[in-house]
Image (cartoon, grey):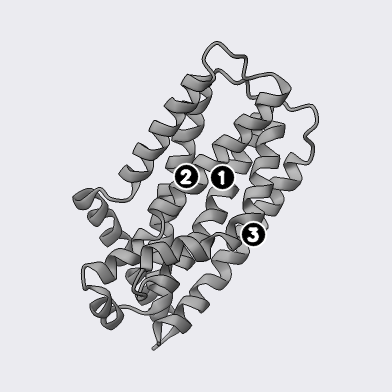
């Protein structure tokens, strides 16, 4: 088979997996909808806690930066592993292994999770800023950290969901093994958001965005190869 035909087959497999994920989400509404409900309820709670307080004070700026990233982190742990866990829960994992190659499966699900996570990042940012009234002094830093941070969470958490998908307590295991992998993105994400919200003691927002981008590229780059090794077990 020529390289052109091989590329076309691989692309078709990725698109087929992506379309399957989209249809499954519309039918089951267990992924993005779960993240949206969690994020909305948490943001409303935070907004009520900050009622009649000025979120633009230095101490609250740091707190708000941490809260935004905590919301994104836990929303990702709730939604992203589902793309692999649901295959084993529904008994379609073996069929998927017969019909597609591991790299195509991984990329099809990652592309869906990227779109899902970026939409969630946008929703969380808009709702949090709108309901709390915090001022964004560095919008480009905010956008860069949310974009690259979302991708880094997708790379790490999706891979952990794939690794844990065939275990007995797969949902709990996926969350547990994700924790060490999201420590660095969490540190960089909070640092970048602190500067975006105007904290006078925060610096290095651009460095944080670069670190998140590098982490996302690394995790997304090695993810298919690790998943391919797990796929054969």
From the viewer's side, name the closer residue of 71 and 112: 71
Q: Position of residue 29 (x, y in %)?
A: 25, 48
Residue at figure coordinates x 52%, y 62% from the top left: 178
Q: Where is residue 92 in the image (x, y as percent from the top left)?
A: 23, 73
Which residue is disc 3 drawn over? 215
**Horizontal and vertical percent position of residue 14:** 36, 68
Residue at 47% across, 20% down: 48
User: In the rendered view, does 126 fall on the left or right side of 86?
Assistant: right
Disc 1/disc 3 C-alpha distance (Å): 12 Å
Residue at 45% over, 50% down? 76
Q: Is mark 3 on a helix, strand or loop?
A: helix
**Element on which disc 2 rests:** helix
Marks 2/1: CA distance? 7 Å
**Distance from the alpha carbon under mark 3 to that under mark 2:** 16 Å
Can you see residue 137?
A: no
Asked if marks 2 and 1 touch (Cβ < 8 Å), the reply is yes
The tag earlier along the polypeptide, 1 or 3, is 1
Q: Position of residue 44 (x, y in %)?
A: 43, 26
Task: Classify residue 41 as left or right of residue 128.
Answer: left
Mark 2 and mark 1 lie on one chain; the one further toward the N terminus is 2
User: Where is mark 2, residue-wise?
Assistant: 118
Q: Name the residue under label 1.
A: 147
Q: Which structural element holds mark 1? A: helix
Asked if marks 1 and 3 touch (Cβ < 8 Å), the reply is: no
69 vs 97: above or below: above
In which quadrant of the rendered view does residue 85 lie? bottom left
Quadrant of residue 107 in the image?
bottom left
Label annotation for residue 164: none
């Amino acid at each position: 088979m020529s390289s052109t035909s091989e590329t076309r087959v691989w692309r078709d497999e990725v698109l087929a997996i992506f379309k399957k994920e989209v249809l499954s989400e519309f039918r089951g509404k267990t992924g993005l909808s779960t993240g949206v409900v969690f994020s909305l309820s948490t943001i409303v709670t935070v907004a009520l806690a900050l009622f009649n307080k000025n979120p633009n004070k230095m101490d609250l700026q740091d707190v708000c930066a941490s809260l935004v990233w905590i919301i994104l982190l836990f929303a990702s742990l709730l939604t992203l592993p589902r793309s692999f866990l649901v295959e084993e829960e529904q008994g379609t994992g073996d069929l998927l292994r017969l019909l597609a190659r591991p790299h195509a499966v991984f990329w099809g699900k990652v592309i869906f999770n990227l779109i899902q996570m970026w939409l969630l990042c946008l929703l969380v940012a808009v709702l949090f800023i709108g309901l709390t009234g915090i001022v964004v002094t560095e919008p480009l830093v905010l956008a860069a950290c949310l974009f690259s941070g979302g991708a880094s969470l997708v790379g790490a958490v999706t891979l952990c969901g794939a690794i844990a998908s065939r275990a007995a307590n797969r949902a709990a295991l996926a969350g547990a093994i994700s924790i060490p992998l999201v420590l660095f993105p969490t540190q960089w994400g909070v640092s970048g958001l602190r500067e975006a919200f105007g904290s006078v003691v925060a610096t290095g927002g651009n460095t944080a965005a670069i670190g998140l981008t590098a982490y996302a590229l690394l995790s997304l780059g090695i993810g298919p190869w690790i998943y391919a090794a797990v796929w054969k077990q």
